[in-house]
Image (spheres, grey):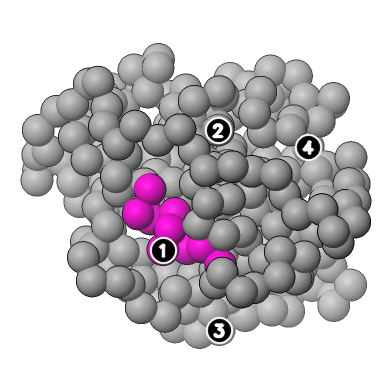
Amino acid sequence: MKRSPLLALPLALFLLCIAPVGVASASPADQPPFWAPAIPALPPMPTKTAPPSAPPAYLPPSYSGSSPRTHASSPADSTFAHDVSIALRVVERYWSSRIVGFRPVSRIVPYRVDGEVMCGTQPIPTQNAAYCPVGDFIAYDVNWSEHVYQELGDAFVFYLLGHEYGHAIQQRLGINYQFTIYQELQADCFAGAYIGDSIKVGDFTLEDGDLDELKNGLFSVADPEDEPWFQEGAHGSAAQRTGAFFDGYEQSLEACDMPSSYHG
């Protein structure tokens, strides 16, 4: 994924966004965090309700598989830490232009072992990334994230941060669905909107294969086919997650069920 030279920040600025590990504890009554799915191994290569008989209506995306604007990748600007810093800069620029009075998350917290970072009273497990409303921060497993980065490509980092930032936006706008799958699919749609809209204004451009990386990444974090959609913690099938992401990517926030209180 090719970034605009204006966004090629030094690694030192990224490190300034990283806070020391450790978060103040909270009572068990605190709102639990929205978990990203655990991935044990990579493959080779206003409150809403819905009856249990009505699963989400997301359809597979109209995925083209290529970008009209492609650029050769450059190893010099494709380090994991550098891409995280760029993704953070772009996603915060995006939401600051969409939400009046936007407030960035308090910090980005890397970790390496189970329980190293707590969200209130709950430890954040490895092979994961999560937004924690208790403390308003995003945490990610460094080892897992870098492995995904190497296996799936740099584009997935932009999705991963965009998805977790989407949960922070839900917190700020007071969005709270009854079923977690709706919460997760909306965060996927937010990630797609921020990436698609940022490309349109030139904050970064896609390289050949980036859309394939995003599609493969969404498939890798999908729920098993036999998991009930209404189960607590459900994130969505591969078709639902790619559908939600590319709806946002192609149609912007209009596809993401934004609340009436949103002012963009």
Task: Report the Cα–Cα distance between label 1 and label 4.
Answer: 29 Å
Q: Which of 101 and 198 is in front in this view?
A: 198
Q: Earlier in the sequence, mark 1 or mark 4?
A: 4
Q: What element carries label 4?
A: helix
Q: Which of the two discs, 1 and 4, sits closer to the camera?
A: 1
Does residue 145 appear in the picture of this structure? yes
Q: Earlier in the sequence, mark 3 or mark 1?
A: 3
Task: Report the Cα–Cα distance between label 3 and label 1.
Answer: 24 Å
Q: Residue at 18% of width from left, 35% of height from top?
A: 208
Magenta region:
215-223
Mark 2, Cα crowd under 10 Å, few <14 / some 14-19 / many 20+, is many
Q: Residue at 30% of width from left, 36% of height from top?
A: 65
Q: Mark 4 points at which residue?
A: 173
Q: Quadrant of residue 122?
A: bottom right
Q: What element carries label 2?
A: helix
Task: Report the Cα–Cα distance between label 3 and label 4.
Answer: 29 Å
Q: Earlier in the sequence, mark 2 or mark 3?
A: 3
Say the numbered circle drawn on residue 220. 1
Q: Which amino acid does label 1 sit on?
A: Ser
Q: Earlier in the sequence, mark 1 or mark 2?
A: 1
Q: Main secondary structure of the magenta part?
A: helix
Q: Name the residue under label 3.
A: 115
Q: Residue at 36% of width from left, 78% of height from top?
A: 41
Which residue is outermost to the bottom?
114
Q: Which of the two discs, 3 and 4, sits closer to the camera?
A: 4
Say the numbered circle drawn on residue 247. 2
128 shown above or below 123: above
Q: Which of marks 2 and 4 is nearer the N terminus?
A: 4
Badge 1 vs badge 4, beta-carbon distance below 8 Å = no
- Tell me: 26 left or right of 199: right
Badge 3 vs badge 4, beta-carbon distance below 8 Å = no
Which residue is outermost to the front?
53
